[in-house]
Amino acid sequence: MHVVAQAGGEITRETFWEIGPLGRGMFYFLSVVAVVVFLYGVYERFARYTRGETDPRDRLDDLPTRILAAARIVGSNEKQFDRDLYGGLMHAFVMWGFLVLLIGTTILFIDLDFYHVLTGESFWKGDFYLAYKLVLNAFGLLFVVGIGMAMYRRYVVRNERLFGPHTGLEDDAFVWTLFLLGVGGFLTQGIGMVGQEIRAAETVSFVGVFTAGLLEAGGLTPEGAAAVYPWVWWHHAILALVFVAWIPYAKPFHMLSSFANVVARDEQAGRVLPGVPADLDATNAESIDDFTWKELLDQDACTKCGRCSAVCPAKASDRPLDPRNVILDLKSYREAVDAGGETKPIIADGGASVIDAETMESCMACMACMDACPVEIEHLNSFTRMNRQLTDQGDVDSNVQNVFQNVMRKGNSFGEPQRKRADWADELAFDLADAREERVEYLWYVGDYPSFDDRNRRVARSLATLFEHADVSFGILFDDERTDGNDVRRVGEEFLYLELAGHHVESFAECEFENIVCTDPHSYNTMRNEYPEVEFEEFADDPMMPFEYEGRWNRDGEIDVLHWTQVVEELVREGRLGLSGTELDYTVTYHDPCHLGRYNDEYEAPRELVRATGCELYEMPRNRADSFCCGGGGGGVWMEFDEDPKPSEERLREALEDTDAGDAVEKFVVACPMCMTMYEDGRKTGGFEDAIEVVDVAELLIEAVETRTEPDAADGNATTTD
């Protein structure tokens, strides 16, 4: 028996049982080679990021706090559990199993090669050894179970989001290597326990005991175990060392890059797009090195899990966008260029480019991909960079180009004269205050669609009437109001956005008000989150900027920018609309607008308002952060696509078929003018005109208020809400 009995007869095992001095020397040599190859590969990867552009955000400030936060996010697997309990458990088992096995190997390395060398003693014995073996057996088993779950999902269920043009042999090699490492470790342990009699007392190694029992039942003797052990041990050791060396060069690198990506995340990403450099010679996406180091890191952090693809409304509608493939296409191109391959345009309208223009035009800027991503990839930053490149090249969709022209010439996306901007208010029974001429509590930014679109004008009148009922001091900018710039910016026209932002900042400065209230969640997002980010003085010498403004607007956060539902919800709580919660008895469902929900985490105010009317609210399966985009964001409201079904049609189907109320749902409630436009269109094209009515929360509220005050005055209602 080749067993080491420690002082006092404390239980342990010989690390290199049946491995002679030459074998030990070879193992250490191969270990050094593997570690050197690993370290060189990691260095090469991170050195590559330095060739990317400087990121405009400070992503490494307060680094200790960032690392601790990333450790909590990664360690808890909270993003993996989101929408996918099976996937969360699977990843938790694999990740924590791998980490504990790695820690266990490190402990053994410290004991054998440092502590024992320095002291001649070993702490890897007795109770410590038994506790060590118990923990490693438990987490090793979880590791194997997790890998088994992954293989079941990949090869038996064949979950479609795990497959695509960038998946294949590398992914198979990764999962099979992990499986063989896990099973090989227990097989090595079981053979060792058969061959070493003293280890019969090592009952805490329950997986090893079970494996040894199976081997003995199969006829393995102690002599046979001693003979076969070196072969099994070397197989396991070489596979482990090859895996270590392989990590920086393939999919396993995500174990490092994903954590780094979470550390460097920007919690404002998406809702606040990065600005452009003040250097007018700077390019957006002419080459792969125009991308920032964080955007390059995003590409390496992608695990190919397909969660972004599974929630993308563009992909669900058969548009050419798949968020995962865009990120991986960029990565593949970068690696090809680094290897000496031929360069080509990053993005273009047709032709041989890395990404086709239509792919980026398909993006709705809904941020569902970013919300679903477990490793904090900021898709929208890279997508916007490419949209800006399309704008620079003149490859923008013709409909969007017309919108740009309308906004530049007329100040609005409809191309209507600005003098007509407040015509929607002509049918009101009261006059609106001019915020440029008198002090008001709320400066109301109405927006393009409520100002010029007939259906949304009715919503604007309903909201104005609500403010009047509640005796709110409010005013509007009349013809000084222009397009807010949110969607203009997201389709790539950064300088037009800056002009619009600058105009509004100047207009705000000339008014006396306490807070800004927005009808449209898109306006709410850009004025709340993006306008304060713009350093207008950087562009003071730019002839494209026809305004003079120094500094940053609302630098100290003195002005609150609110969505109207937040304001009115407060009014309802204060009893200023006199609602009892029993006025209406409709069965309704509510759709969360992306820019109000996912972008700004406002989910409850609209729901509280719906409940305040007395309506019975049923949730669609995809609600709150999981809401499905209407299709209008990111310029989608201005473009035409060959898609089936349209996002709006799919959402209306969900409302009628997948809520608990089923087809008893009478009204589909929205809180966004673009959503209203898209769903009214979806009702017609999807054949839902007679099945469900699309209404805004404001319309429900005004009906409830006027039902309470004038229950029989149908004509009176029409004069204020139509």
Image (tube, rainbow, N blue to C red):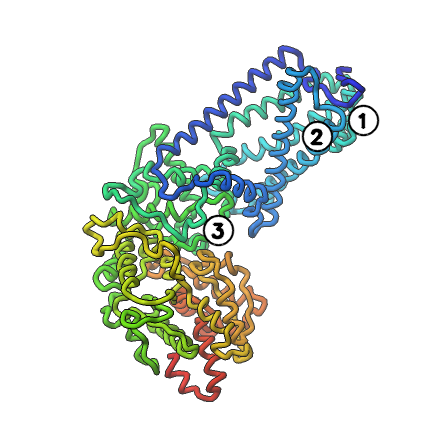
Q: Of 541 and 204, which appears nearest the observer? A: 541
Above or below, comparing residue 121 to residue 96 in the picture: above
Quarter of the figure with the C terminus? bottom left
Q: Position of residue 9 (x, y in %)?
A: 80, 20
2 or 3: mark nearer the eye = 2
Locate residue 134: give its quadrant: top right
Above or below, comparing residue 14 to residue 427 in the picture: above
Q: CA distance from mark 2 to mark 3?
A: 38 Å
Circle on res. 132: 2
Q: Position of residue 252 (x, y in %)?
A: 52, 33
Query: Does dot 3 land on a helix, a strand or a loop?
Result: helix
Circle on res. 371: 3
Sequence order check: which comes first, mark 1 or mark 3? 1
Q: Of 550 and 35, which appears nearest the observer? A: 550
Sequence order check: which comes first, mark 2 or mark 1? 2
Above or below, comparing residue 351 to residue 471 in the picture: above
Circle on res. 201: 1
Residue at position x 50%, y 62% from top?
603
